[in-house]
Image: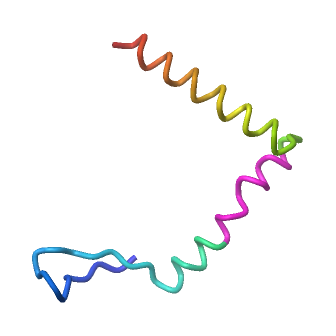
Amino acid sequence: MQRRRSAADERRVEIHLTGEGRSLKEKALHLPQQVAAAAGLEPGELRTLQETLAKVTTALRAAAR
């Protein structure tokens, strides 16, 4: 990442990806499919798991209040 002052407004700092950052972003795009394959899950099963985990997380956060 690079931080640069905005040319239009010096008070603003803009964040830009470097070439290395763009390369890492490309690699990360395939990560969910690789995790699902390693876990032996079909794409639909992975979505169901994500939804279930989101519900559990929400319930646990609410219970902790």
Q: Quadrant of residue 6?
A: bottom left
Quadrant of residue 31 within the rendered picture:
bottom right
Residue 1 image offset from top left, x and y in percent = 40, 76
Q: Is residue 55 above or below residue 65?
A: below
On the image, the x and y values in percent for residue 40 come to 89, 41
Q: Residue at x 76, y 39 (%)?
A: 46
Q: In the rendered view, does 65 fall on the left or right side of 61?
A: left
Q: Residue at x 44, y 78 (%)?
A: 17
Q: Position of residue 56 (x, y in %)?
A: 58, 20
Q: On the rendered structure, is 4 left or right of 56?
A: left
Q: Residue at x 53, y 82 (%)?
A: 20
Q: Is residue 7 magenta?
A: no
Q: Is residue 31 left or right of residue 38?
A: left
On the rendered structure, is 13 left or right of 47? left
In which quadrant of the rendered image does the C terminus lie? Answer: top left
Q: Tell me how the rendering is colored.
A: rainbow
Residue span colored magenta: 27-38
Q: Is residue 32 magenta?
A: yes
